[in-house]
Image (spheres, rainbow, N blue to C red):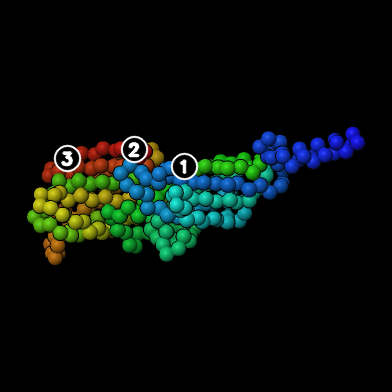
């Protein structure tokens, strides 16, 4: 009878025991990691709605080498703007989870503005068809270090991989309607490593934008998103901005912007005015 009671107690304890209260899983066993990645609880940032609707997850070993032959996971945003994953990993090892979130193409696996086909350590801006004044170029990333000693839940906060460049030209067009704005970059940053946060590469690029002047007396404003380093003052860009009036091919406004600083997860606000002096302020994103 005593042996039966001991055996029954052991069985009940085993049934009730979880990884959280009974210690780590044995090394080499498979554990499930439930992941939720999001930009913010309400899926908005400052005064704009987040347009990123797909997220890619790649898993690396602690030394930065790809895990499981570089397999990637893709998730669409749920109703709350969260991206959910549940990969299975070998316990007893440390991993680095790397996330990239942006606007998808026709499906969640289709790139739209950023080429991820070479992996999240070599993301490239697609420069063949750049459109400025488009919030869909906003993009986010995150890195989470995970020790797979048990099945667990992981929350990752996505931050901008880009900076937003805002230009208030000070120019007031004579006509209302849709004005065409062309920006020509001499040294646009084009590559991003989502594991290290390193920005690399430089390319000439041309972007267009249809900017509406809705009322007489309204100034011409323009914005774009660029890959940028996390540190202040590490990188600058040069670009020429030109605008034409509705139904015209003649340039109504032109300005050469030089040595404009860019910083990741910041807004760079530029006031051009009518003289050679630029007003430049950097404001951190929430």
Return the disc, 2 or 1, that comes first in the chain's sequence.
1
- Which residue is drawn at the image coordinates 19% and 56% (left, top)? 212
Front disc: 3 or 2: 2
Task: Please state, as top left, top right, bottom left or bottom right, where the C terminus lies in the image.
Answer: top left
Horizontal and vertical percent for residue 192?
43, 50
The dot on residue 157 is 1
The dot on residue 139 is none
- Residue located beneath label 2 in the image: 284
Secondary structure type for disc 1: strand
- Which residue is drawn at the image coordinates 51% and 46% (left, top)? 36
Residue reaching furthest front? 1
**Front-lying residue, 276 or 92:** 92
Return the disc, 3 or 1, that comes first in the chain's sequence.
1
Whether residue 139 sits left or right of residue 9 in the image: it is left
- Which residue is drawn at the image coordinates 13% and 49% (left, top)? 218
Whether residue 284 is visible, yes or no, is yes
**Front-lying residue, 226 or 136:** 136
- Residue located beneath label 3 in the image: 277
Quarter where residue 12 is shown: top right
Horizontal and vertical percent for residue 132?
28, 55
Q: Gap in Å between the C-alphas at discs 3 and 2? A: 23 Å
Q: Gap in Å between the C-alphas at discs 3 and 1? A: 38 Å
């Amino acid at each position: 009878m005593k042996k039966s009671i001991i055996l029954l107690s052991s069985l009940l304890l085993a049934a009730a025991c979880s990884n959280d209260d009974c210690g780590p899983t044995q090394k080499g066993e498979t554990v499930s990691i439930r992941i939720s990645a999001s930009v913010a609880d309400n899926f908005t940032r400052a005064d704009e709605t987040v347009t990123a609707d797909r997220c890619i997850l790649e898993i690396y070993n602690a030394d930065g080498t790809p895990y499981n032959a570089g397999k990637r996971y893709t998730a669409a945003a749920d109703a709350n703007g969260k991206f959910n994953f549940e990969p299975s990993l070998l316990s007893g090892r440390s991993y680095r989870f790397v996330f990239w979130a942006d606007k998808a193409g026709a499906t969640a696996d289709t790139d739209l503005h950023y080429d991820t086909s070479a992996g999240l350590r070599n993301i490239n801006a697609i420069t063949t068809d750049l459109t400025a004044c488009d919030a869909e170029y906003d993009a986010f990333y995150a890195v989470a270090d995970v020790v797979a000693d048990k099945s667990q839940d992981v929350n990752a906060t996505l931050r901008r991989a880009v900076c937003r460049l805002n230009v208030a030209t000070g120019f007031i067009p004579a006509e209302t309607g849709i004005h065409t704005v062309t920006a020509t970059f001499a040294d646009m940053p084009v590559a991003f490593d989502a594991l290290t946060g390193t920005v690399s590469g430089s390319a000439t690029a041309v972007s267009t934008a249809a900017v509406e002047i809705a009322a007489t007396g309204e100034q011409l404003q323009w914005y774009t998103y660029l890959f940028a380093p996390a540190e202040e003052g590490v990188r600058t860009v040069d670009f020429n901005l030109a605008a034409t009036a509705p139904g015209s091919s003649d340039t109504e406004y032109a300005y050469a912007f030089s040595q404009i600083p860019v910083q990741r997860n910041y807004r760079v606000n530029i006031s051009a005015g009518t003289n050679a002096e630029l007003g430049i302020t950097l404001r951190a994103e929430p």
